[in-house]
Image (cartoon, rainbow, N blue to C red):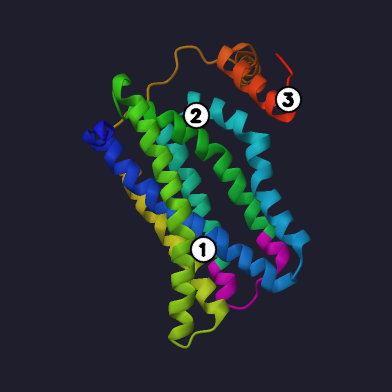
Amino acid sequence: MLAAFTYRDFRVQWIGACTSSIGTWMQIVAQNWLVVSLTNSPFFLGLDAFLQQLPIILFSLIGGVFADRYDRRRTLMMSQVIQMSTSGALALLMYFRAVQIWQILALSFVTGCAQSFGGPAYNSLIPSLVDKKDLPNAVALNSIQFNVARVLGPLLFGLTLSAFRHWGYSEPQAMNACFLLNSLSFLVVINTLMMLRVKHIPPPNRAASARSCGAGSRTSAITPTWRRSSCSRRRRRSSGSRC
């Protein structure tokens, strides 16, 4: 059940990723709260989420090519450093009471760009941390890590907000603490990445980036698993339809 945890590198990386994910989900709730507090506008709340997800939609395919060509650990470290910087910048803006909605939106877009490269690098790194026979267990534990963070992150935000208000601090100061804690959480995952013993092996054939992206798209289109999932989605949208 926990076979993947017997691998030292996977165990270390799982702990770091879980810590960082908890901090990220704590910031997501705090940032949503901040946007509503500043604008009282559902439009800006939705726009903030859209700008963070847009780069992931646009650049994840390029991020996958980048993860295949270059050192995944260094790519992931760079992604974490950028996300730590955006979270730290938001904490500084809150501290100096200079935060504006356009700054939040810009930082969300930069964070999304970093995640569009860090996500493929992380997913590509997992198979190199465990043996092939234990890869399904590693993928399952990684999913558990993500869902645990989705529960604990918002809970930690609520506890932080409640504790700071109880200690006499204002609501903006409590949210600032959440941004700072998230920024510090990236130090954990950066440290775990530095502890990994995995080595990068460059691919023997480096095709052009555009050609690699095209090959990935074609592979997705002809893969039976993708076609079955696409058919399933269409069946859910329209009962009785067939692929």
Quadrant in which the C terminus is drawn: top right
Quadrant in which the N terminus is drawn: top left
78 over 155 or under it: above or below? above
Q: Residue at x 62, y 14 (%)?
A: 215
Alpha carbon of mark 2 to alpha carbon of mark 3: how far? Answer: 39 Å
Residue 47 seen in render: yes
| Residue under numbered circle 2 | 67
Q: Residue furthest bottom?
A: 168
Residue 88 - label:
1
Mark 2: few, some, or many residues within 10 Å (few <14, many ≥20)?
many
Q: Is residue 47 magenta?
A: no
Residue flagged by tag 3: what amino acid is it?
Ser
Q: Which residues are magenta?
A: 91-104
Q: Residue at x 70, y 72 (%)?
A: 38
Q: Residue at x 66, y 17 (%)?
A: 214
Q: Which of the two discs, 3 and 1, sits closer to the camera?
A: 3
Q: Depth check: give the residue in front, 147 or 41.
A: 147
- Give the SS element for disc 3: loop
Q: Is residue 189 left or right of residue 105?
A: left
Residue 32: x and y in percent read: 63, 63
Q: Which of the two discs, 2 and 3, sits closer to the camera?
A: 3
Q: Depth check: give the residue in front, 105 or 46.
A: 46
Residue 42: x and y in percent read: 75, 62
Q: Quadrant of residue 5?
A: top left
Q: Is residue 103 magenta?
A: yes
| Residue under numbered circle 3 | 239
Q: Is residue 230 left or right of residue 19?
A: right
163 over 208 or under it: above or below? below
